[in-house]
Amino acid sequence: MNRILAECKKKGALRSINHPMLKPWDWTFENTDLLEIDVIEIWNDPTFPDNVKATEEALLLWDTLLNDGYRVTGIGGSDAHNRPDESYVEGGPPSLIGDPATFVWAKELSANEILQSVYEGNVYVTRGPILNITINSGESVISLGREVKIQSLLKYFIRSVN
């Protein structure tokens, strides 16, 4: 798997682990070189009964990766396999394409720019509202996916409190 991931990187592919904690489709390659992973699916079809637990575990995994210094983008996807009138449980909500959805902020509408923006973390995942997010740090505007040094934030908060 590590060889395949490395070869995909050479070809410019975005390498993603999808539904990493959702059994029986969870990621089983225990010796994966995490430097070869660009994206991890943190939220998958919320109507699938086992996805509540799998989503919580995926979020914990992503948090651990970020805290350990890995630069991995979190995405969401519906992974819908049912018709819109079908449900995983009798009388339950339907599994719909685009629920949840990953929204990407990109400078232009092109495949290369969208892939680059996902790689950079310029995304958010939602089931509902479309957000227009602006993050300010002092005089700087910070786009989604950017790292913010704690010193910059502390200076901003100290000024804001005074």
Image (spheres, rainbow, N blue to C red):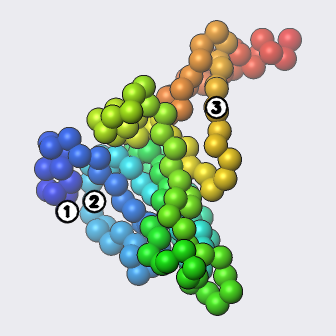
* Comparing labels 1 and 3, the label whose residue is closer to the camera: 3
Q: Residue at x 64, y 9 (%)?
A: 139
Categorize mark 2 by other alpha carbons within 10 Å: few (<14), some (14-19), many (20+).
some
Secondary element at tag 1 = loop
Image x and y of residue 90, in percent: 64, 90
Categorize mark 1 by other alpha carbons within 10 Å: few (<14), some (14-19), many (20+).
few
* Comparing labels 2 and 3, the label whose residue is closer to the camera: 3
Q: Is residue 75 left or right of residue 137?
A: left
Secondary element at tag 3 = loop
Image x and y of residue 49, in percent: 59, 80
Which mark, by number, is residue 1?
A: 1
Q: Is residue 98 left or right of residue 69?
A: right
Mark before the other along the chain sequence, 2 or 1: 1
Image x and y of residue 9, in percent: 20, 45
Which residue has dot 3 on it? 133
Mark before the other along the chain sequence, 2 or 3: 2
Task: In the rendered view, tell whether residue 91 sits above or below residue 133.
Answer: below
Residue 55 sits in which quadrant? bottom right
Secondary element at tag 2 = loop
For badge 3, the amino acid type reads Ile
Q: Residue at x 39, y 49 (%)?
A: 39
Task: In the rendered view, tell whether residue 5 sits above or below residue 112.
Answer: below
Mark before the other along the chain sequence, 1 or 3: 1
Image x and y of residue 70, in percent: 40, 43
Q: Residue at x 64, y 43 (%)?
A: 130
For badge 2, the amino acid type reads Thr
Q: Is mark 2 in CB contact (under 8 Å) with mark 1?
A: yes
Which residue has dot 2 on it? 32
Residue 59 sits in which quadrant? bottom right
For badge 1, the amino acid type reads Met
